[in-house]
Amino acid sequence: MLTVRAPATSANLGSGFDVFGVALETPADVVRVERAAETTITITGAGSQYIPEDPKQNTVGAVAEALDAPATIRIDKGVRPASGLGSSAASAAAAAVALNALYDRGLSREELVPVAAEGEALVSGEAHADNVAPSLLGGFTIVTDDGVTQVDASVPLVACLPETAVSTRDARGVVPDRAPLSEVVHTVGNAATLAVGMTRDDPDLVGRGMDDGIVTPKRAELIDGYAEVHEAALEAGATGVTVSGAGPGVLAVCHRADRRAVASAMVDAFDDAGIESRAYQTEVGDGATLY
Ligand code: HSE
């Protein structure tokens, strides 16, 4: 039996829709695999009751099929589904690493990115790789049609997850097809600023580069309490705040000394809006670990 822990991730970071992603130190999914004649999946942990165990409908089943690697697969969910922290991607990345090793397929982590993204296509309708790439490779990742660029980064983060759920499929439905050039210019400038901030481990630059006026405002409308949580986090010292992935999670960047205050301000603001939430005080973390 092989065991892999793969981290939660936060995609987009505001200005990098479908391009940027970061691995988080916590939470994570743990996947255990054993060779078998056909794939079976059992799921325990956070929100497991909402995830189909039928391999044909499960992100991990798609990975097993893509690698031609049938297995008994046990998933212990630490990353809550539909929370905006790359739940399906964490399971897919863990399964890709585990099955690649179990069947000696010899694929590199980079080569596993499109394999794990097959699982994302099943869940959201599109094989976007901005969650599976950081879950496999760790750090901060930039996904384009030409491949993945990865840098290790050390930036304090808070990921605050309300108890509500938003499906990625629905959240992709509100993304506009077109944007005014002025908004594109603003977003490109911010994305470049954010990427440089990651290479410098600079929470001020990363936070400054998170604002985007194209996708995030539409997604924010799907999240009750978002405006209040955004404002509360900034008041508590966050350098930048945005929707985590497709939401409803909210991601804040801050200095280490402010992280606790930012986390409790976000939870309090959701609470004032009548919504329970949980905040992870975390960091940019490593990619999937094979035990
Ligand atoms: N980039 C994807 C989206 C990530 O925002 O739809 C989903 O987690």
Image (spheres, rainbow, N blue to C red):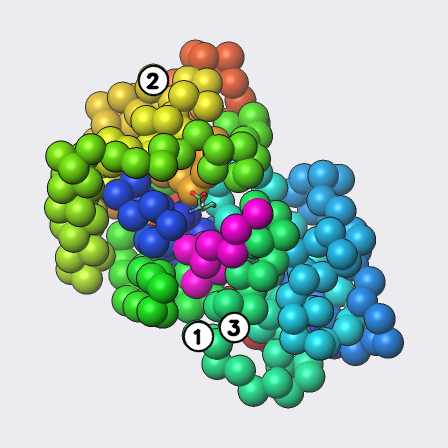
Instruction: Say which of 200 and 122 sits in front.
Output: 122
Q: Which residues are magenta?
A: 125-133
Q: Which mark is residue 110?
A: 1
Q: Ligand 1 quadrant?
A: top left
The amino acid pointed to by label 1 is: Glu
Which image quadrant: the C terminus?
bottom right
Q: Residue at x 27, y 52 (%)?
A: 155
Q: Position of residue 176 (x, y in %)?
A: 36, 33
Distance between the alpha carbons at the discs numbered 2 and 1:
39 Å
Q: Residue at x 56, y 69 (%)?
A: 115
Residue wearing tag 2: 228
Mark 2: which amino acid?
Glu
Give the residue pinned by disc 3.
112
Horizontally, residue 152 falls left or right of residue 194, namely: right
Query: Helix or strand or loop: what does disc 3 sit on?
Result: helix
The earlier-in-sequence mark between 2 and 3 is 3
Residue 74 visible? The answer is no
